[in-house]
């Protein structure tokens, strides 16, 4: 949820997992300005309350006690668990050559529009050890709280970048293999060489990967199914499976 507070845009992050992810993010990409805590849960969630009080003095945010009804009115659902945080916006920059590690693993997500699917994908990608996730140009962070919740906080820990016209050339100059997920002229992901450095490109369920990206691919990989099934996996599921195959091949 987003609203105007103190003449600047702030976002409401719901639940302790999301709030902790912002506090503990190595990226320091956004700041908590205020935490609201359900006063009726102070005893039952004393460890959480004490932790937030300790962090408030370190990071300089206020803690206000409130009630469940107020928290429900400010949040999308009822899974906040008695704690929400007002957080500043996060700016995502276009990727540059300096952002790309030598011998790394990056994923470009093209065409995932649903914030829940985006969050699910980030959760798997971050767990697989990805060095960064690249997004197509749009304002992804308007649903930052939903993405954070769906990703179990991974969205606040994972380096995120915006793509640009020269992105593929930048990765090729750094010695990366360009691997697209697709069907036509593909090889099984389990037979493909996914040793780092690799840029994996995964498209959304509706439009897939654009032809210009496919033309620049060094390899197109597919996921073989365990039975005949004429439908595609969700982009979030496909991205997770392929990312863990990259992890397996680079153990």
Image (cartoon, rainbow, N blue to C red):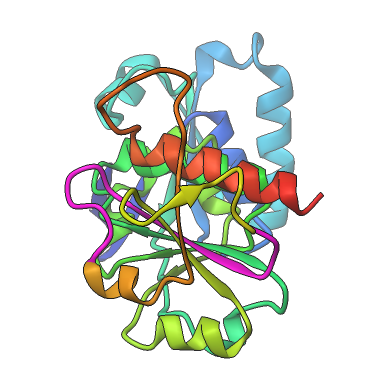
Residue 52 in the magenta stretch? The answer is no
The answer to whether 163 appears left or right of 209 in the picture is right
User: Up-down: is 201 above or below 207?
Assistant: below
- Picture coordinates of residue 249, whole percent (x, y): 73, 50
Residue 137 higher or lower than 96, as above or below: above
Residue 13 visible within the image: no
Residue 204 within the magenta-colored segment of the rendering: yes
Q: Quadrant of residue 76?
A: top left
- Tally the marks: 0
| Residue 31, percent from left and from top | 52, 59
Chief secondary structure of the magenta portion: loop
Q: Could you tell me which residue is drawn at 35 percent across and 32 percent down?
A: 233
Residue at the spot 48% in from the left edge and 71% down from the top edge? 218
Q: Vertical placement of 239 versus 141: above or below?
A: above
In percent of the image, x 73 and y 44: which residue is there?
248
Residue 236 image point, x, y percent:
40, 39
Residue 149 vertical position relative to residue 162 in the rendered view, above or below: above
Task: Indicate the quadrant containing the N terminus: top left, top right, bottom left or bottom right.
Answer: top left
The residue lying toward the viewer, choosing from 97 and 91, is 97
Is 45 left, or right, of 223 in this rendering? right
Residue 115, horizontal then vertical, whole percent: 30, 42
Tell me which segment is drawn in magenta. 194-210
Answer whether residue 244 is visible to the viewer in this image: yes
Question: Looking at this view, is 20 or 94 the one in front?
Answer: 94
């Amino acid at each position: 949820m987003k609203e105007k507070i103190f003449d600047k845009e702030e976002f409401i992050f719901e639940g302790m997992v999301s709030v902790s992810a912002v506090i503990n993010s190595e990226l320091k990409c956004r700041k908590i300005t205020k935490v609201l805590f359900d006063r009726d849960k102070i005893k039952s969630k004393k460890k959480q309350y004490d932790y937030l009080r300790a962090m408030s003095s370190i990071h300089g945010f206020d803690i206000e006690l409130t009630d469940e009804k107020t928290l429900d009115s400010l949040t999308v659902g009822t899974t906040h668990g008695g704690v929400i945080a007002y957080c500043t916006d996060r700016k995502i920059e276009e990727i540059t050559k300096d952002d790309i590690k030598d011998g790394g693993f990056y994923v470009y997500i093209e065409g995932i529009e649903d914030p829940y699917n985006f969050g699910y994908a980030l959760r798997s990608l971050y767990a697989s050890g990805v060095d960064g996730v690249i997004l197509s140009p749009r304002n992804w962070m308007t649903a930052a709280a939903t993405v954070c919740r769906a990703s179990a906080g991974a969205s606040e820990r994972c380096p995120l970048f915006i793509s640009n016209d020269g992105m593929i050339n930048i990765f090729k100059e750094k010695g990366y293999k360009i691997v697209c997920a697709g069907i036509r002229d593909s090889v099984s992901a389990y037979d493909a060489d996914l040793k780092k450095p690799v840029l994996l490109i995964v498209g959304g369920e509706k439009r897939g990967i654009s032809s210009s990206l496919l033309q620049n691919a060094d390899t197109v990989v597919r996921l073989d199914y365990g039975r005949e099934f004429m439908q595609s996996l969700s982009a979030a599921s496909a991205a997770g499976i392929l990312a863990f195959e990259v992890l397996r091949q680079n153990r």
